[in-house]
Amino acid sequence: MLLKVSQDLSTMIVYAEGLEQQTILGAKNINPEPIEVTTFANPILLTDTDKICRLPSSLRDTVFSLYQSYPRTVSYDGISVAWSPFEYPRVWCPSIDTVFFARTLKKYLNENVKSVVEIGCGSGFLIKYALRYGNSIERAVASDINLEAIRCASAAVSDESKRSLISFVLPDPDAPSLGFSGQFDLIIVNPPYIPRPNENHDNPYEGLDLIRKLTKEARGLLKDGGHILINISSLSGNEPLEWFKENGWDINLLDTIKVPLKVNSITSDITKESQDWLEYLKANKDLQEDEQEASGYRYWHELKLYDVHS
């Protein structure tokens, strides 16, 4: 399956590729070009079960079948990354926060950016985007505490002409530092941003540990005149911004998007662990609740993209 998001994030087109054209769409032969199935306007998720359920029943079932077919490819602004949970377990597919980040990232990939690091590279979409559009990049680093993410990111950039410029780093999640050195013109971070007490540091969406480490080490990692682009959820509260300010950084808000909190291990509200986590967010964080679910989802938060600089 291919999900193609428009550059302004106004539409997302769902396509069937390869064997899906035969097994799901019933085509006699496989078309080398993807077959368009449906279009969603103003996507707030790349897997929006509410919008899928509102489709006519036959189309709904077709789209649900496509979402159960892998690999899944996400394409935005000429960059595509393929992902499968079976090949890369515990790695998140490029999501709405990924393309939201990329929309602004391109503006920072100017001739002054000769070195870039992505901390928490996940699927590798953003470092691939930086390599493609950073015409002056001479050195790139992608870091993640998950070996499967390193594998996924390495595969994602394998066809890039600047593949030889990138190094991959696998830090120890329990180490007190980020686990790499050097100085960079641009640091990009789409980190875990959902706090809870006794957070797990190896969870792809949980906790603020990565942000906390970055605020302490950024002075040694960022060149003079450089920038940190970081995505922070409203659920993180004011702590991350205060950490940066305490260390003398200036912070500019660049963009925001309101999205559902669609993390089953939090919102399922079935196990004691999910119940405790949800109650913590309700009591202590800016978790927005639509009790009638008129908007399609009960829980919402805002993603906020910041420029951090001296």
Image (spheres, rainbow, N blue to C red):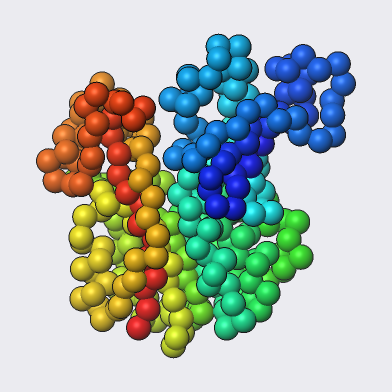
Which residue sits furthest bottom?
224
Report the residue at 36% width, 27% height from top. 296
Estimate the x, y position of residue 109 in percent, counting from the top left: 58, 72
Q: Can residue 74 be seen in this view?
A: no
Q: Quadrant of residue 60?
A: top right
Q: Quadrant of residue 61?
A: top right
Q: In this view, does 308 lie above or below 74?
A: below
Rendered location of residue 231, percent (x, y): 39, 58
Callout count: 0
Q: Is residue 199 left or right of residue 89?
A: left
Kindly give the residue lying farthest to the left in the view shown. Answer: 283
> What residue is at 22 percent from the left and 27 percent from the top?
291
In the image: residue 277, left or right of residue 48: left
Quadrant of the rendering where the N terminus is positioned: top right
State the residue in front, 298 or 20: 298
Counting from the top left corner in percent of width and height, residue 71 is at: 66, 34
Q: Nearer the viewer, residue 204 or 292?
A: 292
- Tell me what residue is drawn at x 60 percent, y 32 percent: 39
- Is residue 238 in view from this perspective? yes
Q: In which quarter of the image is residue 262?
A: top left
Quarter of the image where the C terminus is located? bottom left
Vertical relation: 97 (above or below) 84: below
Q: Examine the rendered structure and indicate whether residue 90 appears above or below residue 192.
A: above
x%, y% of residue 274?
Answer: 25, 30
For image coordinates 16% across by 38% down, the residue present is: 282
